[in-house]
Amino acid sequence: NAGVTQTPKFRVLKTGQSMTLLCAQDMNHEYMYWYRQDPGMGLRLIHYSVGEGTTAKGEVPDGYNVSRLKKQNFLLGLESAAPSQTSVYFCASRKVGLSRSEQYFGPGTRLTVT
Amino acid sequence: EDQVTQSPEALRLQEGESSSLNCSYTVSGLRGLFWYRQDPGKGPEFLFTLYSAGEEKEKERLKATLTKKESFLHITAPKPEDSATYLCAVQAGGTSYGKLTFGQGTILTVHP
C-alpha cells in the first residue's frame, strides 16, 4: 500500500514550456486535490476532484488544468509555464462518506520555472 | 472568508522543554480542525482531527486541544525527532468537497 505517490519529484522548466504532474493513490479514495506550497503562503488549493471524470477549481486555478480519467489518478497540467508557478506541488486524497475525514498527502513535486 | 493564523512562526526548544503551538481560526461553522506534521522535503503527515470545543487528543508527546476560537498543540518533553513544521487547517461547514484552509505553519526545532 503506497498511499499517494507523485511523479516526478523534481522538474526544471523554461518559461513557456508545458508539463504534466501525475498523482496516483491506491486507497480507493473518491476525492483528490492539488495544492501548491509557497514560503509564507501556506498550502493553497489549485483544483480538486470529487470523482472520476469530474474536476473543479480551487482558490488559485489560473494557469493550470486537471484531468481525472481514472479514479486512482489525478493529473495537473501546466500549458505554458511561468516563473510565478515555481513552487512545491502536493497532491492529496480523501475518503468519501466521512464528512470530516483527513486528507492524505503525497511527497510533493518541486518545480522551478526559469 | 475562513482564516487560520499560527503562532509563533518559529520555536526553538531544548530537549525536554515543554511548550505549546497556537492555531487561531475564524470559520463559518467549524466542521473539523486538523493538525499535520511536515518534515523538510516531504508531504504533510496527518496527526489529529478535532471536531468540537473542549475536545482533546493525544499521541505520544503531542496533545491537541480545541476551543471555539483556537487550538493548541502541546508538546511535552520534546525530543530532537519532534523537529518539523506543524500545520493547522480548518474545514468549514457547507463545503461538500472537504476544502481545507491552512495556516502558514510553525517551524519547531528541538535541540539536544
Image (cartoon, coloured by chain):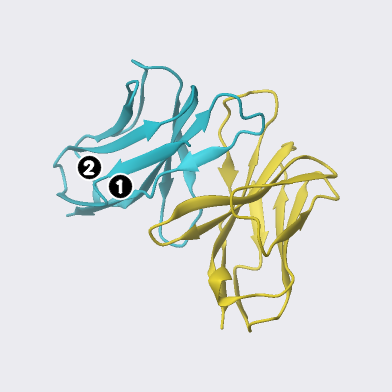
- Residue furthest front in the image: B1
Whether residue B63 is visible here, answered yes or no, is no
Which residue was labeled with disc 1?
B82
Instruction: Report the residue at 64% width, 23% height from top.
Output: A98
Question: In this picture, is A41 found above or below B70?
Answer: below
Return the chain for callout 1: B
Asked if labels 2 and 1 share a chain, the reply is: yes
Q: Quadrant of the C terminus of chain B?
A: bottom left
Residue type, label 2? Pro
Q: In which quarter of the image is residue B86?
A: top left
Q: On the rendered structure, is A83 left or right of A2?
A: left
Give the class, few, some or many, for how many residues have Cα within 10 Å of label 2's Cα (few <14, many ≥20): many
Depth check, front residue: B98 or A7: B98
Picture coordinates of residue A104, whole percent (x, y): 58, 42
Which residue was labeled with disc 2?
B78
Chain ID, cyan in image: B
Picture coordinates of residue A101, whole percent (x, y): 58, 29
Return the chain for callout 2: B
Depth check, front residue: B2 or A19: B2
Is there a contact, CB below 8 Å, between mark 2 and mark 1?
A: yes
Question: In this picture, is B30 found above or below A1?
Answer: above
Instruction: Classify mark 2: helix, strand or loop.
Output: loop
Whether residue A42 is visible here, answered yes or no, is yes
Picture coordinates of residue A41, whole percent (x, y): 43, 56
Shade representing chain A: yellow
Picture coordinates of residue B68, whole percent (x, y): 35, 21
Instruction: Classify mark 1: helix, strand or loop.
Output: helix
Which numbered dot is residue B68? none
Instruction: Report the residue at 65% width, 68% height from top.
Output: A8
Residue type, label 1? Asp
Give the class, few, some or many, for how many residues have Cα within 10 Å of label 1's Cα (few <14, many ≥20): some
Q: On the rendered structure, is A67 left or right of B33?
A: right
